[in-house]
Amino acid sequence: MKAIVTVVGADKVGIIAKVSAYLAKHSINIADISQTILSGNFVMMMMVDFDNANIGIDTARKELVEELGTLGVEANIMNEKVFSEMHRI
């Protein structure tokens, strides 16, 4: 299963490192990544693959939100199919 990870918040050192370490710890592969800084705000989207993950998407969402809350940024993980349907024009 593929999912979209979004992270938004004030730019600071360690955001990508914390997300990548969390995903690696749970065998969630990063398939694609895009990040930018918009007016001082860090914005990142990742396509990740849960095929070999040792946790489910709901647990990953909850834990990643908690992990990144310590950095003051917001995160979300959404099934890629749901994300695509929500953003279909």
Image (cartoon, helix red, strand yellow):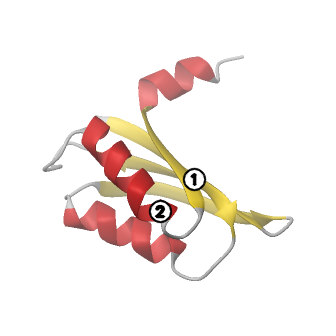
Q: CA distance from mark 1 to mark 2?
A: 7 Å
Q: Position of residue 80 (x, y in %)?
A: 44, 31
- Camera-nearest residue between 61 and 30: 61
Q: Is residue 13 above or below residue 28?
A: below
Q: Secondary structure at mark 1?
A: strand
Does the image show residue 68? Answer: yes
The C terminus sits in image quarter? top right
Q: Few, some or many C-alpha atoms within 10 Å of disc 1 (few <14, some 14-19, many ≥20)?
A: some
**Which amino acid type is marked by label 2?**
Leu
Residue 48 in percent (x, y) is at 37, 49
Residue 45: x %, y % from top left = 56, 51
Question: Would you place residue 71 above or below residue 9 in this image?
Answer: below
At 44% from the left edge and 52% from the top edge, which residue is drawn? 65
Is 54 positioned to the left or the right of 22 in the image? left
Q: Please give the name of the residue rendered at 51% of the width and 80% of the height, measured from the top-left corner.
A: 14
Residue 68 badge: 2
Q: Name the mark on residue 29.
A: none
In the rendered view, does 10 fall on the left or right side of 70?
A: right
Q: Earlier in the sequence, mark 1 or mark 2?
A: 2
Cβ atoms under marks 1 and 2 closer than 8 Å: yes
Farthest residue, direction bottom: 13
Visible residue check, residue 43: no
Q: Residue at x 35, y 38 (%)?
A: 2
As drawn, is 37 to the left or to the right of 78?
Answer: right
* x and y, in percent, of residue 66 in the image: 40, 56
Residue of label 1: 74
